[in-house]
Every structure is written in structure tokens, then in C-alpha cells.
Image (cartoon, grey):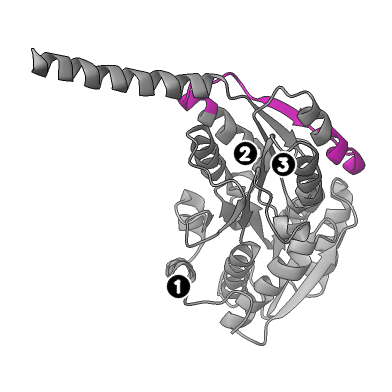
Amino acid sequence: MKMKMKIMTVIGVFLCITIFTLVGFASSSTAVLIPGTIGDNPLFQEAIKGVKEAVKIVGLDEPKIIEGGDDYNSYGKKLISLAATNQYDILVTFTDAMASSIIEVASIFPEQKLILINGNINLATQKVPPNVFSVNIKNEDQGYLAGYFAGLITKSSLPNANKELKVGIMMPDIYPAWTDILIPAYNHGVKAVDPNIEVVQSILGSWVDVGKGTQAAKMQFTQGVDIILLLTGSACMGAVDEARVEGKYIIGVNTNKIYLEPDVILGCVLIKNREEIKNILLRAYRNTLPFGTEEIVGAKEGVISFTFRDPNYKKNVPEKIQVAMLECYKRLQNGEINPLGD
């Protein structure tokens, strides 16, 4: 009889814990503010997939997704408006550009939980507020891998690699995470292959004008560049068509774009945004996410990676270069390489 009562007590406690957990999940709701538009940004597309997977796993309603559009000045107001509704337990947004807005909202609405993804919260504060969690992705790991790959390609015997020892990088606009971190790391990766390789840089002044990307690529190729790293923005994608016409090479970022032009886009440096965001939200829903802190992730955590398994990469890139890239990645993961310099 005592044994039976003991078993019933254990079962009762278990059921109480389970019900408490499920109620906690059911009362959680999530809104996501995209600082831009989803359609022209594969990284945001993957992020939304990660959010939806997380809420599905724990049985929550679909998240509210809001696109900020092209009016950059409205992003902060949109975040404040979302918090003011008092409808969402967790607000999620992205990039360095939203750091100040996150801090402002955290101050006005101290009960509102906020998550900043792929953004440096330290740009806006020296101490992370107790209702904020931030994860910053190491742009230097991304830049170094891309630079090392560019250096290997320009020195290779591939049919469209020339003898000029020049590589390029193209960005839609000036952005501190690129100019201060990614580009110096890209240069360092290139020089690690051969210090004599020259890096040619283009700033388009537009995120959407594809023609500017085409013209900038043409100018770089005229100068002897045979491979260009393209940063985020549809304007940069204009370089892909020009590379195909002129018989040159491209490196993509963030997501795998090789399928668009397999003979032109030889490799891509990846941000595994989908899994990272899904895991962060699952921790938040399970009350294990350490709000009031910042995490920094990169190659070591597997968040930054490369298109090592892509079939076209395996087919079009010499095996010697594939081996060198894997070795470089492992050294980066093990902390044997400082992407920003010795």
C-alpha cells in the first residue's frame, strides 16, 4: 500500500511538472522584426525557418513576422510598437543596426524579453540588460575562410584563374561589421596564402541596384581580379552574371548559392543561422537562456562553416584546395588561427 502511494505521488509530481511546463510554453508568444525584407535576403529566410521550427517543436502558435522594409529609420519605432502591445513574451530582431533599439526598448519595457541575433550589443551598451540576450556571430571567421579560399583559387591552375594574383571583395555599402572586422580578416586570409596577393575592394552605394554590381565586377576583372567575394545584398549579385560572361569566379556568403551558377560560384562561407536561432529560442522557451548575457559564436561552435559537402564544390574545386580548406577550418575551430592577425 505504501509502495503504491509512493508511486502515485511520483506520478503526480511528474504530471504537475509536465503541466507547468506545457502551460509555460502555451503562454509564450514570439514576434520577429526583420530589419529589411525577407524576400531578397536568404539569411533572413533561414532565420524565419529556424523560428518556426522552434515554436513547432514546443507546440506554440505561429510567430508574428514583421518586415521593416526599406525605411531604416522606422525599425526602432516598429520594435517599440511591438513591445507596447504587450502581446509577445519574446521579441527577436537582427544585426548591429538594431543594437541601440534593443537597449531602448529594454529600458522602456523592463518585463519584455528581447533577443538580438547576429548583432553586437556592445555597440549600444557596456552591460547587457537583464531582459536582453544577444548572440554575435564572428564575422572574422567568415572573412578569413573566404580570404583563404580566394587566395588558393587565384594561385591555382584552374582554367579561369590568371597570373595576376589579384582577388576582389564587393559590398553594397559601408557597414562597421564588414569594414572593421570581416574585410581585415579577409585580407589576412588572402595574405596567409601568399603575401603578394593584392585585394581590390568595391563599395556599391546600393543594396538593390544590380547594375552597380555588374559594373563594379567589370572594373575589378579589368584590373586582373579573377575571383570576388560578394557580401550581402542583391546589388552584389550583378557580379555573378558578369563573372559568367567574362569567365571569372565568385565566392558567396551566408547561404549556399553555388546552385545559381555552379561553374562560377565555386564556394560559399556559411552562417548556420537556422539551427542557431532554433536552438536559442528552444532555450528561451525552456527557461534556460541566460538573459542579461551575450554569446559569441563562430567556427568553433560550427555556426560558421563552408560548402565542403556541396557536390559542385567537390567537382569543380581541385582536391588539393579542398584539403587545404578543411585544414584551415579545423585550425580556425581549434583556435590555432587569429583571423584578425598574429
Q: Earlier in the sequence, mark 3 or mark 2?
A: 3
Give the residues drawn in magenta, as a range. Answer: 55-78
* Quadrant in the picture for residue 228: bottom right
Binning the other alpha carbons within 10 Å of mark 3 as few (below 14), some (14 to 19) or many (20 upward) gives: some
The foreground one among 49 and 320 is 49
Q: Quadrant of the C terminus?
A: bottom right
Percent from the top left, x then y, of residue 125?
75, 58
Q: Describe the element under mark 1 as helix, strand or loop.
A: helix
User: Residue flagged by tag 2: what amino acid is it?
Assistant: Ala
Q: Are marks 1 and 3 in contact (CB under 8 Å)?
A: no
Q: Describe the element under mark 2 as helix, strand or loop.
A: helix
Q: Residue tagged by mark 3?
A: 41
Q: Residue tagged by mark 1?
A: 331
The foreground one among 96 and 10 is 10
The foreground one among 181 and 155 is 181
- Point 88% across, 50% down: residue: 211
Q: Residue tagged by mark 2?
A: 47
